[in-house]
């Protein structure tokens, strides 16, 4: 709640942050090079398929207990098999080079793979656990390393580091961003147990009420996760470890919740809305190259804007806290 003592405090501005992000990318176009190169690799480079490995597993669905004993399940089984076959047939293991939540953004992860204006891409069919897991680890580690370099380059344009980046600082920040998905997965695993028990209990009472509870839990999860949205920004800008970065993000978002919500909504609408335009050409059309360039520019600009917004939101938080401390001291 605002009081008369903080009226003159400059709040973080959404439009100003977005304009600053677009200006920095326009003046430093090399910052979009990694997204472009990654999309070109996924478009024209070789593909690694895993549908052949999972095909026997999908076909075995019909042999599950009860599936082959009732006609009602025949259509369901066929639908499940067809759906999973279609999904896996369009999946390229190289898509995992675009890691989450920190990684090089890619437009081609949502496009039909294995085809480009020059024809069909060279593909490799992975058939063993060792091949899939080994290559997946290579892609993930490479993806996080490239994402670390990408975010580091953008953050240095927003707020230059006091010291020249070294291999030590690079691997330190790489470790921190790898720990983010590890932490999130552990949290989800811990929460999945009570959530599953709750949904099972509610299902016994009313299936309709179960859907309501599930929707409420999803909203609650988003509300819990949103204060952590600037965790990577604290890592890159303030060189904080994961725990300190999470606490900084929570404190900043708590004070500037309204502005942060508007910034996230504006960024999401901008990126996702324009993605429909970028993805309009088919995978075998050279016009998709325009989409790759446009996507790389827009996403990089929004990421740069998020760093600007976080810097301003941090200053706003610090100023407000200092005023409150002075007021309480009086």
Image (cartoon, helix red, strand yellow):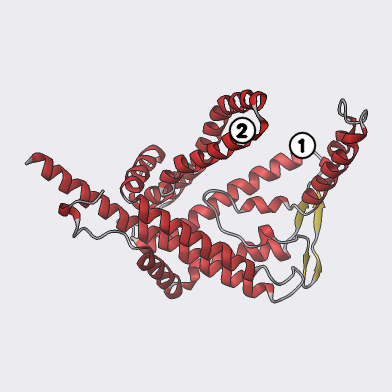
Apparent side of residue 140 relative to residue 88 in the rendered image (left or right):
left
Quarter of the figure that contains the C terminus: top left
Badge number at residue 209: 2
Tag on residue 247? Answer: none
Q: Secondary structure at mark 1?
A: helix
- Residue at coordinates 35% horizontally, 68% vertically from top-left? 16
Q: Residue at x 93, y 28 (%)?
A: 69
Residue in view at x 87 percent, y 25 percent = 65
Q: Which residue is mark 1?
A: 129
Front residue of this view, candidates 88 and 216: 216
Where residue 121 appears, as percent x and y from the top left, is 79, 63
Q: Is residue 132 left or right of residue 35?
A: right
Confirm whether residue 268 shows in the render. yes
Give the spatial CA distance, label 1 vs label 2: 41 Å
User: Which of 258 and 23 lies nearest the eye of the viewer?
Assistant: 258
Counting other residues with Cα less than 10 Å from the Cα at mark 2, is it few (<14), some (14-19), or many (20 or more)?
Answer: some
Disc 2 is placed on an element classified as helix
x, y percent for residue 202: 61, 26
Q: Position of residue 290 (x, y in %)?
A: 63, 75
């Amino acid at each position: 709640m605002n009081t008369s003592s903080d009226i003159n405090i400059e709040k973080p501005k959404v439009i100003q942050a977005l304009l600053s992000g677009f200006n920095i990318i326009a003046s430093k176009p090399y910052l979009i090079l990694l997204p472009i190169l990654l999309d070109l690799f996924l478009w024209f480079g070789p593909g690694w398929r895993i549908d052949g490995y999972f095909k026997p597993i999908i076909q075995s669905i019909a042999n599950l207990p009860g599936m082959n004993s009732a006609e009602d399940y025949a259509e369901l089984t066929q639908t499940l098999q067809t759906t999973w076959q279609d999904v896996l047939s369009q999946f390229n293991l190289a898509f995992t080079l675009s890691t989450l939540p920190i990684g090089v953004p890619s437009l081609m992860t949502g496009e039909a793979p294995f085809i480009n204006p020059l024809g069909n891409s060279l593909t490799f069919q992975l058939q063993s656990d060792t091949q899939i897991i080994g290559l997946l680890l290579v892609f993930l580690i490479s993806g996080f390393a490239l994402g670390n370099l990408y975010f580091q380059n953008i953050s240095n344009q927003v707020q230059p580091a006091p010291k020249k980046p070294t291999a030590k600082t690079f691997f330190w920040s790489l470790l921190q961003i790898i720990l983010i998905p590890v932490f999130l997965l552990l949290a989800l695993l811990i929460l999945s147990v009570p959530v599953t028990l709750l949904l099972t209990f509610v299902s016994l009472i009313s299936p309709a009420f179960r859907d309501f509870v599930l929707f409420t839990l999803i909203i609650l999860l988003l509300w819990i996760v949103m204060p952590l949205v600037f965790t990577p920004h604290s890592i890159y800008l303030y060189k904080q470890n994961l725990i300190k970065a999470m606490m900084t993000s929570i404190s900043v978002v708590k004070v500037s919740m309204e502005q942060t919500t508007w910034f996230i909504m504006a960024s999401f609408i901008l990126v996702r809305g324009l993605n429909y335009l970028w993805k309009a050409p088919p995978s075998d059309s050279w016009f998709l190259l325009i989409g790759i360039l446009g996507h790389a520019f827009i996403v990089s600009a929004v990421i740069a804007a998020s760093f600007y917004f976080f810097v301003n939101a941090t200053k706003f938080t610090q100023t407000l806290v200092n005023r409150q401390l002075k007021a309480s001291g009086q």
